[in-house]
Amino acid sequence: MASKTPVGFIGLGNMGNPMAKNLMKHGYPLIIYDVFPDACKEFQDAGEQVVSSPADVAEKADRIITMLPTSINAIEAYSGANGILKKVKKGSLLIDSSTIDPAISKELAKEAEKMGAVFMDAPVSGGVGAARSGNLTFMVGGVEDEFAAAQELLGCMGSNVVYCGAVGTGQAAKICNNMLLAISMIGTAETMNLGIRLGLDPKLLAKILNMSSGRCWSSDSYNPVPGVMDGVPSANNYQGGFGTTLMAKDLGLAQDSATSTKSPILLGSQAHQIYRMMCAKGYSKKDFSSVFQFLREEETF
Amino acid sequence: MASKTPVGFIGLGNMGNPMAKNLMKHGYPLIIYDVFPDACKEFQDAGEQVVSSPADVAEKADRIITMLPTSINAIEAYSGANGILKKVKKGSLLIDSSTIDPAISKELAKEAEKMGAVFMDAPVSGGVGAARSGNLTFMVGGVEDEFAAAQELLGCMGSNVVYCGAVGTGQAAKICNNMLLAISMIGTAETMNLGIRLGLDPKLLAKILNMSSGRCWSSDSYNPVPGVMDGVPSANNYQGGFGTTLMAKDLGLAQDSATSTKSPILLGSQAHQIYRMMCAKGYSKKDFSSVFQFLREEETF
Amino acid sequence: MASKTPVGFIGLGNMGNPMAKNLMKHGYPLIIYDVFPDACKEFQDAGEQVVSSPADVAEKADRIITMLPTSINAIEAYSGANGILKKVKKGSLLIDSSTIDPAISKELAKEAEKMGAVFMDAPVSGGVGAARSGNLTFMVGGVEDEFAAAQELLGCMGSNVVYCGAVGTGQAAKICNNMLLAISMIGTAETMNLGIRLGLDPKLLAKILNMSSGRCWSSDSYNPVPGVMDGVPSANNYQGGFGTTLMAKDLGLAQDSATSTKSPILLGSQAHQIYRMMCAKGYSKKDFSSVFQFLREEETF
Amino acid sequence: MASKTPVGFIGLGNMGNPMAKNLMKHGYPLIIYDVFPDACKEFQDAGEQVVSSPADVAEKADRIITMLPTSINAIEAYSGANGILKKVKKGSLLIDSSTIDPAISKELAKEAEKMGAVFMDAPVSGGVGAARSGNLTFMVGGVEDEFAAAQELLGCMGSNVVYCGAVGTGQAAKICNNMLLAISMIGTAETMNLGIRLGLDPKLLAKILNMSSGRCWSSDSYNPVPGVMDGVPSANNYQGGFGTTLMAKDLGLAQDSATSTKSPILLGSQAHQIYRMMCAKGYSKKDFSSVFQFLREEETF
C-alpha cells in the first residue's frame, strides 16, 4: 500500500471531503487544494500535503480528481492562470467529478490533450451519504483505454462505475437522468395532489400507481407526500436529500445542452422553470420532493 | 352454473366484446345492448338475449355492466330517454367500466340511488389483450358494502380488482395513473432523445436510467426508442398498444378534474396539449410511446 | 319614460348592483331577485319590486338580465326548481351577462327556445368602475333579430355593445380575449423581469417594446412593473383592477372550451396553471398584473 | 464626401449586403471581408476594397461593423486567429450588429478594451426589406460617450437608433422584444384558433381583440390567420417575413440569458420549445406567424 503514488484532489466541499477520505482509506497519499484554505485543514492535520494552487497539484501528482460546484469553477481549476493545465505532466490522468456542461468537458479534454494529458468526466449520483459510505455511482466519459485506470480510483469512492462513451457522455448521462427525475417527481407530486383532491387516500393511490404504468422511482422509492413512506425527505419535513437549488442547477445544464443540440424538451423546460421558481419561493434548501408542498398550498379566498 | 341469474352488458366495442365473452365463459347468461346492432350479432348467435334499449336491459337484469367510449355515451345509457334508470329495479347493481369524468360518475350514482339502485365506477387498465385474457385491472369506486358483489363479476374479466373508495374514486385512480404515465412517457422520450443527441448509446442510456432515480415504467418496461426493447410498440413501428387518441382523451378528463378541483397540474396540462397536437399531426392511431418519434424528427434547413 | 315596461334583474353583486342602477337611471322599473336578500334592500328602498325567486321575476317581466358569478349559479337561476324557465312568458328576452362556459349558454338557449323565449349571452368586459359609469363592453351572442332589443337595454349599461354571432359567441369572444390577455400579461412580466436582470432600465425597456413588435396592451396600457406607468394597479401595490382569482376562473373556462373542441392551447394552458398557482400563493385578491411580483421574487441562498 | 475615412464591414449576407450598400450611398468607402469570397464580389466590382481576414480589416479601418449569424461566428471574427482584435488600432470603434448572447458581447467588449478599442453591440430589428430601405431599428449598448459616433454610421442604415445602456443591453433589448413577440404571436394563434372553433368569425374576433385588452402587435398588425389582414405573411402562405428558424435562434438566446440570470420564463421557455418543434416539422423557412397553421391542423380519426 505504501508504494501507491499520490493522487491530487481539488475541491474539498460537502462531497469532495468524504470522497477524498475514502481515497485515503484505500492508501492513496493525497495532494490537496481548495480555494478555501479551511477546507484543507483536516487533511493537513491527517498528514496529507496541501499546496497553494491547482497548478501545484499538477506538478506533484499525475492522477488528479476535481470536484467543483460549477462550470466556471472547473474552467478556472483547469484553464485558469494557476490552473492544472499550466503545469500538467505528460500522461497525467485528470478526472472531473463536477457536474458541468458536457460541452465544457469536451473543451477541457481538448486542452488537456494538447498538453499530452487525458481528461475524463465522471460526475456522480448519490448524495453526501453515498459519498461517505463509498457508494456513489460514477458515470464516466472519455477515452476507453483509460477507463481501467480511472476505475481503480473511482472504485474507492463508489460502488458503481459506469463507462458511458466518449468524453462528455458521463455528464450527458447524469444530466439526462436528473432531467427525467425532475419531470417524474413533479408529475408524481401533481398526480398525488390531484388524486387526494378527488378523494383518494394517498397511501392507496401510491400503491395503485406503483403496481401500474404510472410507477416511477419518485412514486415507489421517494414518494413526495408526507405519510406515504418512511425514511424519505417527505417524512422529515423535506430536510436532507437533494436540494431544490441543485436540481435547478442540473436542469439549467440540461436546458443549455438541449438548446445547443436543438433538442425539444417541452416538459424538461417546464421542470426547469418550476424548480427555478421554487428557489425564489423559499424552497431552495429543501429536498426537491418538496414540489408536492409547493403545489399543495391551498387557495385562500 | 346454470342457475346464475343473467347479467346485463351494454357496450360491446373493442373492449366490451371480450369482456362480455369472459362473463359468458364463467357461466353468466347475458342481456345485451349496443347502439350498433352489428356489435350484438355475435352474442345473439351464441344464444344470448339481445334487447333494444338500455331500459330493456334494466328490466331483465339486476346486475348491469356498461363499457362506453365517452361521458356523453354513459349519460345517455343511464339517464337518456330509454336509459337504464328509466326501468331499473330496486336493489340493482350498476357497474360502469367506462373511463369518464368522476364528477359524472358521482352524478349518476346519485340518480341511481334515487331509484333504489347502486352505481359503482370501475374503469379498467390494460388494453384489448388484457380484456381477452381476462387480465384487466379494475379500479372500483362506490359503497364498500357492495364491493364483494361487484368483485364477483369483475373477477371474471380481470386479475386485479382494487377497491379505491367512494364513488368516483375508481375514475380518479385511473385518470391519475394515466396522467403520470403520460408525463413520464414524454419525459422519457425527451430524455432519450437529448441523450442520443449528446452522444449516448440508447441502450446504455436506458440501462443507466433504469438503475438510477430516473427509472420509470416508460423507461424500463415500455421504452419508446426503437431498438432498446423487444415486444413493445416501439419495436413494431408503434402499432398496437395504447393509442394517442385514447391518451389525449384521458388527459382531457384529468384536465377537467384538475380545473374543477383547482389543482395545479403544470406538467399534466402540458402533456395534454402535446398529445392533443400529436393527434393533429398524424399520430392519432399510433401507440402513445410514439411521442419519441414526434419529438425526434430532424430539423431541415 | 313612465310607460317603460319593467325589466327583471337577477344577481345584484359587485357588478350587478351598479348595472341595475344604470337601468333605473334610464327609467326602467325593475323586478329584482338575489339569493342574498340583503343585496336587494337598497333597491327595495328605492321603490323597486323585490320578488322571492327567479321564477317570480319571469312571471312579472318579459325582459330579464342575469349577472351571476359561475356556471352553476346560472344553471340554477334558469333551470332550477324555481328558475326563470319555470314561469317564463312566451316571447320573453333573457339576457345572461354572467361569464360562463359557452356550451352552457347554448344549452340554456335551447331550453328557453322550448318555452318560446329567446336567450342571449352578453358577458361584459370592464370592471366595477366601468359598470358604475355605464361604460362596459357587452359581447353579445344569439339570434341576430333580437340584437336590437338587447341593445336597447345593454346600451344603458355599456358604451360598447358588440354583436358576435350565434348564441355562445359572446362568451367565446370574452374567453378568447381574456386568454390572450393572460398570456400577454405573463409574457410582459417575464420579459420585463428578464430585461431588468440583464441591465435594462424598466422604463426604457417598456418604451422599446412599445415601439416594436413586442407591443401589447399589457406593455403599453397596463404595464405590470411598478414605476413604469401611473394610474395602473402596478403603481398602487396591485390593488384594484382585475383580480387574479377572476382571471383564473376565466382561464378555466378557456381550458374547458379548448378541451371540448380539441383545440391546442399550449400557452393558454400554462397561463391557466400559473394563475391557479398564484391563487394558492397569496395573490388571489391582487390585480392579475401582480404576476410580475410573483415571478420577481429573488432567490435566497 | 470624398474625405470620409473608410469603414470596415464584415459579414455580407442577406442583411449585411444591403446594410453595407447604404453606407456606400452615404459616401463611406468600405473595407470588406466575408468568409465566403463570393459575397464580396459585388462590392469589389463597385470599387470597394476586399481583404482576406477580419484582422486585415482592422488594419485598414478604425470603424468596423460586423453582421454575423451566430455567437460562434462573432467570436471567430473578433477573437479568432485572424480576428479583428489581432490588429485592431487603438481608439477604434467596433460595432457588432449580430444578434448574439449578451454575455458574449460583454466578453468581447472587455477584450476590445484591453486593446484600447471600444466595442458596442447594436443588433437590429426589421428584416431584409428594412435593411434595403435603410429603415432598420438599432438597439445599441456600450459606453455612452461613443454613442454619437456609432449613431453617425448606424443612422445611414436605420431610421431608429436607440441607446439602451451599458454594453450587452442592445442584445438584451432585442432578445426581450423577440421573446415577448413570440409569446404574443403563439398566444394570438391559439386564441384565434380557439375562437374560430367556438364559432366566431376570424375578422370579427380580431376586431374585438384589437379594441380590447387582448390587443397586441401580432393581432393588430401581423395577424396570423389567412384572410384577416392584407399585406402580411399570413396572406401569402407565410412566405417572406421573419423565419421560424430565426425566431427559434433568438428564443435560444433568451433561454440562455434567462438560465444564466436565474430568471423564470415559463411562457418564454414554452415558446422556445414550440418554435424548436416547428423547425423539425417543416416550418423552418416559413414566417413565424405560421404557428397558426401548425396549431390549426385538424385531427384525423
Image (spheres, coloured by chain):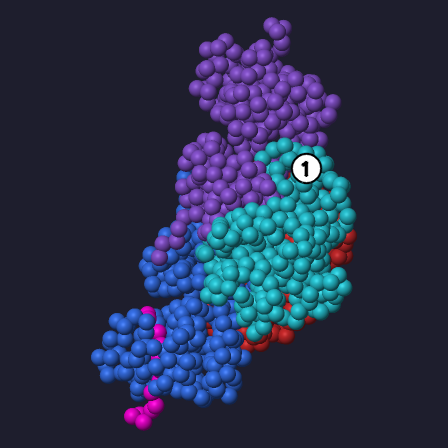
Chain colours: A purple, B cyan, C blue, D red
Magenta-highlighted stretch: main secondary structure? loop
Q: Is residue A91 one of those drawn in magenta?
A: no
Q: Nearer the viewer, residue C165 or B212?
A: B212
- Residue matched to label 1: B206
Depth check: give the residue in front, D265 or D81.
D265
Residue A274, visible in the rendered structure: no
- Tell me the quarter of the image containing the N terminus of chain D: bottom right
Residue C8 belongs to magenta span: yes
Q: Is residue A194 above or below residue A167?
A: below
D142 sits left or right of D283 in the view:
left
Q: Position of residue A119 (x, y in %)?
A: 66, 25
Q: State the quadrant of the C terminus of chain D.
A: bottom right
Q: Is residue C277 visible?
A: yes
Q: Nearer the viewer, residue A89 or D206?
A: D206
Task: Identify whether D145 is placed above or below C2.
Answer: above
What is the number of callouts on the image? 1
Question: In the image, which residues are magenta?
Answer: C1-14
Q: Residue furthest bottom?
A: C3
